[in-house]
Image (spheres, rainbow, N blue to C red):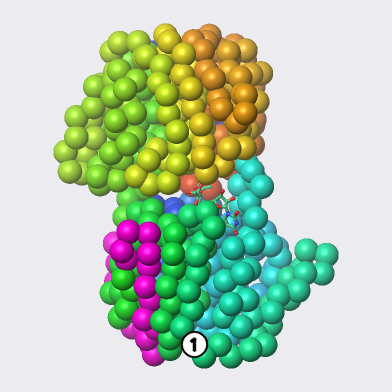
Amino acid sequence: MKILLDPIKRVDGVVHISGSKNATLPLMVCSMLTDETITLYNVPCISDVLVMKQLLEDIGIKIDYDIENKRMILKKGLLKQFSNLENIKKIRASIYVIGGLIANKINFKSYYPGGCAFSKRPIDYHLEAFKAVGYKITDKNNLLKVRKHRNIKQDLTFKIYKQSVGTTINLLIINVLRKYKTIIHNASVEPEVLEVINVLNKMNANIRVDNTTITIDGVKQLQGVSHHIMSDRIEAGSYMLLACASSKANLLIKDIDSSYLTEVINTIKELGVYVEINKNNIHIKKDYPLVGINKVASYYPMFPTDLQQILCVTCCKAITPSIIKDEIYPNRLSHVKELQKAKAKIYIKDFIIYIYPSILDINKVYAHDLRCGFACIVMGCLIKNQLIIENADIILRGYENVISKLKHIGVSINVE
Ligand code: EPU
């Protein structure tokens, strides 16, 4: 799919934010942990969710997805190993299904999970966790054979080397039904992780969070749950940065818990843009030129890595230089390549991104990954001619109704 963007003068209107991708995917997997029904509301219709649905159906979860009403009902049947291995490679979150099979003591074969390949994304922490609960994993030409070989009848303590969203969630999945205590040090406490803990506790789990230490007291069984999924702070931040990049903007972001976006809001204020916050709305008014900023993307509550690429594009529009560093994924730089093709004055030295005021000039860019894709859309706001974005399907992995939402706020966008 190609996206065609025509130059626009301003962004104006309302954007309703959808349910969070990175909360929805593990919450769907929680259906593997109970015999009762899980009902999720505010489920975004994005391609990663559709792939996750196929993955879960393949291993024996019955799913009824009412897209119009954003409601998904999941119920565990007789679980079995993957029969369609190809889907595993399509999303990173398939690693949670692997965790779910382990929690259910099933032996299986799997490929490595896929997802956006913006950087080296190892799964060594996950494999260590699987081994610690008694699984043996062998790798033959990238096909993993996962076999239970020991019963671990004891409390376990993990210290995650680098705070990891996926590893923390998988440690919850594989230990919540173990009879023993599990302690996770240096756990990720990103809002999406806390959302999973909240839902598991609603299902009768016994999980406590103290700073970055999580304690799980294993329970015998979990019950069903109904849950309205939190809104997607990254989607909201993406539209906020798009508004900042356009020459003028008057944008109301609705259905978003602004408390999850404190650092993003601070960043936008540092750029010189007016932001007004109510609990579930964020109003952005942009009339004046942006000023450059100095920003480090890191763990919550710092600026999120998932917005780093988009922020870089916005900063090209500033009248003074910016310096940006991504501490989680220093190599998340696919957008820099596209910006350099567009003659932006953007340079990397020792993984630090230096951005100088730039006039972009290009008519075709490539969306290498999901957030690079949205960054390309923002590039369209900075260019005086039509911009074609190739490989634009990748944007549908994480942005619900992106074309109609953009049209609604005045972006001149078409699909080919
Ligand atoms: N890491 C390892 N080994 C592992 C796991 C992680 O070295 O086994 C490292 C990573 O390389 C990285 C750091 O730990 O440097 C943190 O990675 P994390 O595990 O937190 O990332 P993830 O769970 O694979 C999730 C989101 C990403 C988001 C990151 C960071 C999902 C499905 N994905 O990935 O979302 O960038 O956390 O917040 O939840 C996106 O939405 O565009 C996206 C890529």
Residue 222: percent from left, percent from top? 36, 83
User: Mark 1 — residue?
Assistant: 154
Query: Badge 1 local density, few (<14 within 10 Å), some, or many (20+)?
Result: few
Q: Residue furthest left?
A: 278
Residue located 34% across and 35% down the image: 264
Residue 41: percent from left, percent from top? 32, 62
Label 1: element kind:
loop
Q: Which residue is more in the foreground, 304 or 310? A: 304
Indicate left or right for 31 with 335 as reference: left
Residue located 61% across and 19% down the image: 347
Residue 385: percent from left, percent from top? 55, 12
Q: Look at label 1 and name its amino acid.
A: Gln
Q: Which residue is more in the foreground, 237 or 84? A: 237
Tell me where residue 339 sits by quadrant: top right
Highlighted magenta segment, given as a residue range: 209-228
Q: Which residue lies furthest to the right in this view?
A: 141
Residue located 62% across and 28% down the image: 350
The quadrant of the picture occupied by the C terminus is top right
Indicate left or right for 256 with 164 as reference: left
Residue 399: percent from left, percent from top? 46, 44
